[in-house]
Image (cartoon, helix red, strand yellow):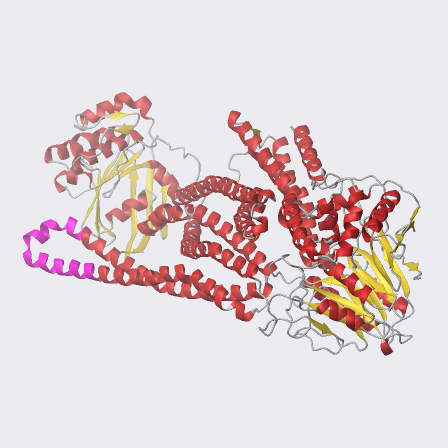
Amino acid sequence: MFDNGLGFTMMLVSTIFVLVTTYYLFVLFKEIFTKKRTFQGNGVKGIEILLFSFVLLGGIGYCLYKAPYALYNSTWALIDEFGPSSLMNAVKCLIVVIPMFFLYYMLSYFFVKKGDKPYFMIVVLSILSGIGNSMVIFVINAALSRVMNDESRRAGVESGLYLFYILGIALFTVSAMVVRKKLIVITSEVVYDKRIQIINKLMQAPYDKFEALEDGNIHAALNNDTENVSGFVNAFVNGLTGVITLVTCFIYLATINFLGMVISVLVICGAVGAFLIASKNAEKMFEKNRDIQNTFFKYINDMLKGFKELYINKRKGKEFTNDIKKSCEDYRDTRVQAEFDFVGVSILGEILYIGVVGIVVFIFPLLFPNLQNNTLRNYVLVYLYMGGIVNQEIFLVPGVMRVLVSWRRINQFIKDISCIESNEKKADHKVQNSKFDIKVKDVVFQYKNENGEKFRVGPINCDFKSGEIIFISGGNGSGKSTLAKLITGLYTPDEGEISINGEKADQETLGSYFSAIFGDYYLFDKMYGIDYQSKTEEIRKYLKVLRIDDKVQVKDGLFSSTKLSTGQRKRLALLVSYLEERPAYLFDEWAADQDPEFRKFFYKVLLPELKARGKTIIAITHDDSYFDDADKHIKMETGQILEYKVNLTVGA
Amino acid sequence: MRKYLLAGCLILLLLFQAGCGEEIPAIAGDASFQAEGVSIVNKGNYYNVEIDFTCGLTHKQLGEAYAKGILKVVPNYESLVDSYIGENLTSYENKYAMYRVEDIKPQVNKEYAEEIEGMASVFSGGSQNKFKDNKISKDEFFLFNLFTDAVRGTQCSYISVYGDRSDDHRNMVARNLDWYGGSVNQLPKIQAFITYKYTDKKVYSIGYLGYMGILTGFNDHKVFAGILDSGTNAPYSSEGRRSYPLDLRFALENTKTMKEAAEFMQDPTKLYSFNHNIGFSDPDTSIILENNFSGNGTNGHKVKRAIRTEDSKLNNNVSWGIKNSIASVNSFILYGNHDNHSSNKYNTKRWNNIKKQLQNKGSTVSFEELKEVACYADGSPGTFSESGDVYNKMTLQMVIFQPDTLKLEVFFRPKNIRKNPGNPVFEKITVS
């Protein structure tokens, strides 16, 4: 049945292809019948696509039928006897393979599935695109061989070779276009999925672990790396198409002269290797340049933020200028060096193929004395054609590397944050608004600060009841905020326990009791988690109470502005906290940024009002003039409760 | 939806199948034809033709008589030949093939040209060269006769054993003609054993009705010859070129020894359009004339037209090493000649198979064993270009001949089947 290995290989590949296509067709039919895919006719566009597909399919069919005539000036009957049998086998395979794939393509086009990722189709179409691309040069070569002969000047047209030229272009462009569109959708989906996955993971992470994450890593994973991954489309389409084109070109060259092809591949590999080594040096220099650039940007940041200090202190300004100048110089020098290296690499890339062509022209005739003019010309033409593709492939390598690095980083990041993920989140906690008692018993927590120094809080013992105002005071680093974070469930105690109404409470339960405004609070411009539609009147009332009604309006849960003074922003945060309607409130030095009048209003009016509503208020404060207004006062020092005072005169 | 898709697939399949061959109905002709100077007898798979140049008719008159006889025994001869040309040439190639004929025709032996013109005058195409019109014009008939010179060459094998390797010490030759037979077996329908009878000599051709040159033939001096195309991809030129099958006929008609015939064909003043080999055999031995008149050889020098014997030094990477035997495929292998062999699997596979099969036969080879070598097909005959089978899908004729005894057995591809049979049947032809 097979006269050579090529015929067998083709039949084997086709059989595998048919089996794989059959599998995908089966899956597709199953999805249609189980309604996972729905019919989408796409109106006129759908009809156009259908017609165009049939025209293309008809074109392919006609070209197959005319292949012996156009390619060999022959007939199928002669090919059957003379060979190459591979052509017969190829056509037999294509007669089965093309309609099957066409059916699969059309069905998946008209029966759409949300989030479909047709990787098989993309790979097949990319290969088709590469074949179409290389087909163009083969046809040009064949046509040139004929039209350069005076006898057959019109043979390019009369033999029908031009049809194969058109078909090659059509296959290349149509396949590449379809692949690009599909990959754009898929890549965007992947980027979306990865971002959402990261966000979900982050949102489920315990606070103390989240706090330990580098901001830069989160930004890089959510922004830079995912954006890099979206660059995969171009890299994949151009890369795979180019590779297929090169492979088919090499097969074509092997059919002309096998040894010539082997030598060519070796020469090209050597040249590409030299190119990659050279480009690696340039890349390294660019990396160095980027590091210096980061330093330079840091200096710029320092200059913008510290301009006052630099302006006042001339000596300081001069020294800073020297430093920034040095950074600028380093940036300039490394950039010049990197660009110089890259110029060398670029030129090497450009002359690479000219060099290879030179070897073909000058060395091949010596190596192969029987080499025919046609063969030599074909080699040169194919090489010139391949030159651009090889360059393109080489320049794609850094891009692909970046995509791979980013992909790995994203996955590693997801893996990392998965490791620190808290237990599965409970749904909505039912918070008891009735009386409660939070008991902190022998709680110990330790951590390392930014300088790597160990800090320990505890053992702490205290309790907080509903309808109480508790003030926590203490010097810097006394553990006030840590205690606040332990009470609100942001930190998990290393030892001891926190219970609510006698039952040990986990972090989420604790969190669900509190509305907190920490010192480093963040004010969202939207009222998340608040049923703002039913609280329009309340919002208006509190804006007025907080005396910011002339600065901010709330519409559809959005603040008209958050560009307010620090004190005003804190008041707005207080509004949000109020509206959250939690049983307990934690204010971390909230009043520090308020004017005396409003500070008084806070301690004397707002807090008592909350207390009157049965809320527990824990306020970290240094305002000792109001300490008497608290039911309890906890004074902390070096992580311990120094003084635990119950004020029996308040609220009695 | 599925119905439409199914219908679409069926239409597509029909499209692929359509027009794969122009069917020419088999029309039975007379069993024989006898006229002054011409005798044609239908022998089943071939026609036995005798053209008697001693009858007093001119070559042109004999040509006319021969053509009339052909039309009697094969009434659709014109459509067979015309469609055969049509299958071998594209319409644009047909135009310049005719220009090539114009170039070569002046060099054709005058008497042969007259024979061809005489025959063409009987056919219905006249002077109008209409492509694929089922009629033969004068130029088209010249084209048919100059097929190997103007269109494409033959693809053949030539094997000979002699001396101690031959079981009766007489030279034996096997010669396979691998040629496209046509989609409806046009050539097998007109295959013939032709005797050209002169007063003092006879020349025999194993060829085709109306084909006046020698593809395979011998003379009554027991000189046997067969042509083998040997392309070098050198630029084609027909200007001032001669026809080598017609010259070979002339050589067989006008020489008495193998050496003389080879020298005639080797004559540097005679240039041909296609490079080729010619296998020559006489009762004692065989030689191969490597007739390469273009291009450079492996040592960078201008190649020569030279004779290869079994002792000749061969190009690097080619070896034979079977004493008292010689062979040829469609390549030059003589040392210093252009190497169109080693990188061409068409040739290397067949060459190696011939060698292997001959070696397998032991130190002596009988007539039947030589036939087996010629019939080597590694199962069933595969395609010519790839299988390396000596007997392949393209083999139209296999001629086994012993010059000394004129023992001749020929396999002709059966007229009614395009696919060569697994067990080819040889016809014993009595040479008179």
**Image coords of residue B117 (percent x, y):** 76, 48
Quadrant position of the C terminus of chain B in the picture: bottom right
**Drawn side of residue B163 relative to residue A38, left or right:** right
Q: Is residue A452 visible?
A: no
Quarter residue A252 falls in: bottom right
Closest to the observer, A97 or A202: A97
The N terminus of chain B lies in quadrant: top right
Magenta-drawn stretch, dominant element (helix, strand or loop)? helix
Q: Give the residue displayed 79% in from the left and 55% down from the top.
A: B212
Q: Magenta stretch?
A: A301-329
Numbered disc total: 0
Where on the picture, by quarter, is residue B318?
bottom right
Q: Residue A392 appears at what percent x and percent y?
A: 43, 54
Which of the pair B417/A239 is nearer the observer? B417
Q: Nearer the viewer, residue A496 or B54?
A: B54
> In the rendered structure, does residue A322 fall within the stretch colored magenta?
yes
Residue B419 appears anywhere in the view: yes
Comparing A561 with B156, the one in front is B156
**Residue A40 drawn in magenta:** no
* Above or below: residue B12 compared with residue A278: above
* Residue displayed at 88% across by 43% down: B72
Give the left or right position of residue B104, taking residue A484 as reference: right
> From the viewer's perspective, is residue A80 above or below residue A327?
above
